[in-house]
Image (cartoon, rainbow, N blue to C red):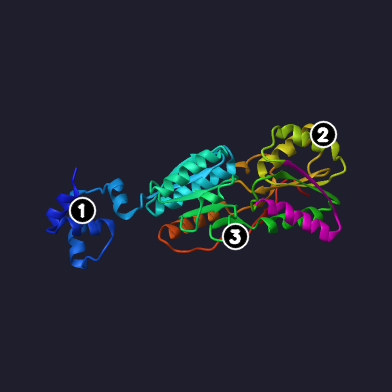
Amino acid sequence: MATIKDVAKLAGVGLGTASRVINKSGYVSEVTKKKVLDAIEQLGYIPNETARAFVTQDSKIVALFLPSIHHAFFSELAFHIEDELDKHGYNMMLCNSSGQIEKELKYINMLKQNKVSGIIGISYNSIGNELNNSMPIVLVDRHIGENIPYVSSDNYDGGQLAFQVLKDTGCINVAYIGTFSKTVITEVEKRRKGFEDAAKENGTNCTLYIEEDPIKDETAFLTTFLQVYKDIDGVFVENDIMALKLVQLAIEHNINIPEELSVIGYDGIETYSALRPRLSSIRQPIELMGRSLVELVLKRINGVQVEPVIHPVVLFKGDTTL
């Protein structure tokens, strides 16, 4: 296997010059650069990324930590993040944190030690004290301080849109089903806020049916809702997975969807598009969000300050609303 010494010898340059060309650091004339690049091609030289990282402090690895790869939204987002990183010559290290702060802190420490170049994170834990604005880290749906960038869909507008759809289809008693956290505030909570505000502005009765995250028994939680709130005719659920479960339970309880109960989810996950009945959902632009996350983290790796990115949402009209 060819070494950097072989490259330097063939190109007729010193080791330092060959290193500057390979690591893209420091000035090298175009003529000399071409000699080195030609030698690399001729020898089939492959740079040692570990050694390069010591020089550039860029391991070409971005860590992605998320609560659960089983969640379709997270896995779909991870797919697009990895695809975009690959286009820019970066590898992705996946951490399935299971919501454990210890695992998330381990990856943050790897960033501090230059073992990874940057982090994209989905966290519902109190990690703010471990972060500062010099770190190349970007979060999803989480606003921590003024200097940690994040990418999100317009959750508040999504909540308002969900109410408008239910209202336009004739629903008069609506409800929001979701979760809350006692320890952190995420952008996701704006879904409830947008829905609640829109109902209030319209003078529509709105029931909030929420449970602390994580819900221990989601089936029991949703079944109780169907048994207790029989006058509700329109529901906005905070994510597609819970919304689909509500639809199936309603069918099992002989509730006609959408004639007796309209249901809207949030995410618009492609994985579920083949299921019947098709779920009406507020669709996040998951691919675009993934690409924005990569764009922001690469800019932060290069020391560029960035602003949060909030993407608009649209309605996917399925079979669970009139």
Q: Say if residue 159 shows up in the picture.
A: yes
- Residue 299 x, y percent position in the rendering: 44, 60
Name the residue type under label 2: Asn
Q: Indicate the secondary structure of the residue bearing disc 3.
A: strand
Q: Say if residue 277 shows up in the picture.
A: no
Tally of numbered tags: 3
- Residue 217 x, y percent position in the rendering: 71, 32
Real-space CA distance between mark 2 and mark 3, rounded to the nearest whole angstrom: 40 Å
To which quarter of the image does residue 33 belong? bottom left
Task: Give the label, 3 or 1, closer to the camera.
Answer: 3
Q: Which residue is mark 3?
A: 310
Nearest the eye: 248 or 322: 248
- Read off the magenta span: 188-211
To which quarter of the image does residue 109 belong? top left
Real-space CA distance between mark 3 and mark 1, rounded to the nearest whole angstrom: 43 Å
Pointer 3 or 1: first along the chain: 1
The reply to whether discs 2 and 3 touch (Cβ–Cβ < 8 Å) is no
Q: Which residue is mark 2?
A: 254
Q: Indicate the secondary structure of the residue bearing disc 2.
A: loop
Q: Which residue is mark 1?
A: 40
At 54% across and 50% down in the image, what residue appears? 129
